[in-house]
Amino acid sequence: LTLAATNTGEGARIRSPYGGRPGFLSLMLQNFDRANETGLLTGLSYDFSGIGLTGLSAFSNFAWGNNAKDANTGRSLPDVDEYNFTIDYRPQAGLLNGLWLRLRHARADFEGGNYTEDTRGILNYELPF
């Protein structure tokens, strides 16, 4: 179980010109770091090896951000909800040992009825040398 919260000051969004950003709510589509934004996240993960499916795991996150403003104009920005779902498969033995298959899907719903979605399939293989 994951729980996180963040609140960004009203003067500007969080900036990170030199790499990673200091935040807990950076998901697939949104960072929840706009000026004056309050962000909340809840997540759940599960390792299926306990029920005999070794190498299979999944997690899901739901985050929402509200009260964001445009730092330059003070205009309110739309509230946003984001849903992320990830399934990982990492075989532990045999010819597929070293393989990592990750399937991900995200949807961000914006106040006013707009939304965006992203689906990803990622295949990694660690060479055995």
Image (cartoon, rainbow, N blue to C red):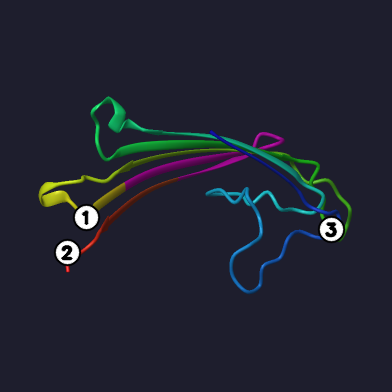
Q: Nearer the viewer, residue 103 or 18?
A: 18
- Which of pointers 3 and 2 lies earlier in the amino acid sequence? 3
Question: Is residue 116 magenta-colored?
Answer: yes
User: What separation in Å lies between label 2 and label 1 (alpha carbons)?
Assistant: 8 Å
Instruction: Specify whether 16 is left or right of 47.
Output: right
Type of amino acid at the residue the image marks with label 3: Ala
Q: Residue at x 35, y 37 (%)?
A: 57
- Which of pointers 2 and 1 lies earlier in the amino acid sequence? 1
Residue occupying the far bottom of the picture: 18
Q: Residue 10 sits in which quadrant?
A: bottom right
Q: Residue at x 63, y 62 (%)?
A: 21
Q: Are marks 3 and 2 in contact (CB under 8 Å)?
A: no
Q: Nearer the viewer, residue 14 or 76?
A: 14
User: What separation in Å lies between label 3 and label 2 (alpha carbons)?
Assistant: 51 Å
For label 2, the SS is loop
Q: Are marks 2 and 1 in contact (CB under 8 Å)?
A: yes
Tell me the magenta residue range. 102-118
Q: Which mark is residue 86?
A: none
